[in-house]
Image: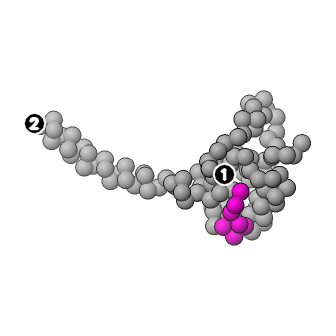
Amino acid sequence: MQANRKVGVLLLWLFPLLAQLAADEPSPDTRLNLNTATAEQLETLPHVGPAFAHAIVEMRTRNGGFRCVEELRALPRLPEKHYVSLAPLLKVKDGRNDCASLEAQRRSGQPLRATGSQ
């Protein structure tokens, strides 16, 4: 009987913490789509001002869209710590991730290149 009571108390203590963690995680439905977001929408993200939003849109236009969020790493003005905070807030169409070649580049130590740039 005491074991059940302890489990109940533990669940009462953990539930609010778990609910807060779930609330802090952006849901897939609220992430911005890199292939459709306007510069103004991109500016609502942390660390994204007008010039950087324009650079994202320009890269998207020049390369025919993003295959995955990781392609943002090819932008020279994006520090790694900013990428880490932006990535969970972004997606590409249907959540697909066609960046296996970028992963191979990173593992080989080559600089990352955006889609279509050689």
Kind of element beneath mark 2: loop
Residue 38 in magenta stretch: yes
Quadrant of the image containing the N terminus: top left
* Residue 99 on image: x %, y %: 72, 39
Label 2 crowding class (10 Å Cα cut-off): few <14, some 14-19, many 20+? few
- Horizontal side of 13 relative to 76 (left or right) equals left
- Which of the two residues, 64 or 45, is positioned nearer the viewer here? 64
The structure residue drawn at horizontal position 77% and vertical position 61%, both measured from the top left corner, is: 57
Magenta residues span 35-41
On the question of residue 62 being in view, the answer is: yes
Residue 11: which quarter of the image? Answer: top left
The structure residue drawn at horizontal position 71% and vertical position 57%, both measured from the top left corner, is: 35
Kind of element beneath mark 1: loop
- Outermost residue on the front side: it is 94
Q: Looking at the picture, which amino acid does disc 1 mark?
A: Val
- Horizontal side of 16 relative to 46 (left or right) equals left
- Outermost residue on the left side: it is 1
Q: Looking at the picture, which amino acid does disc 2 mark?
A: Met
Residue 82 in magenta stretch: no
* Residue 73 on image: x %, y %: 74, 47
Quadrant of the image containing the C terminus: top right
Please tell me whether residue 26 is drawn above or below residue 53 in the rendered image: above
Residue 112: which quarter of the image? Answer: top right
The structure residue drawn at horizontal position 69% and vertical position 70%, both measured from the top left corner, is: 40
- Outermost residue on the top side: it is 108
* Residue 54 on image: x %, y %: 78, 64
The structure residue drawn at horizontal position 65% and vertical position 57%, both measured from the top left corner, is: 33
Q: Which mark is residue 48?
A: none
On the question of residue 49 being in view, the answer is: no
Q: Which mark is residue 1?
A: 2
Residue that badge 1 annotates: 92
* Residue 83 on image: x %, y %: 67, 50
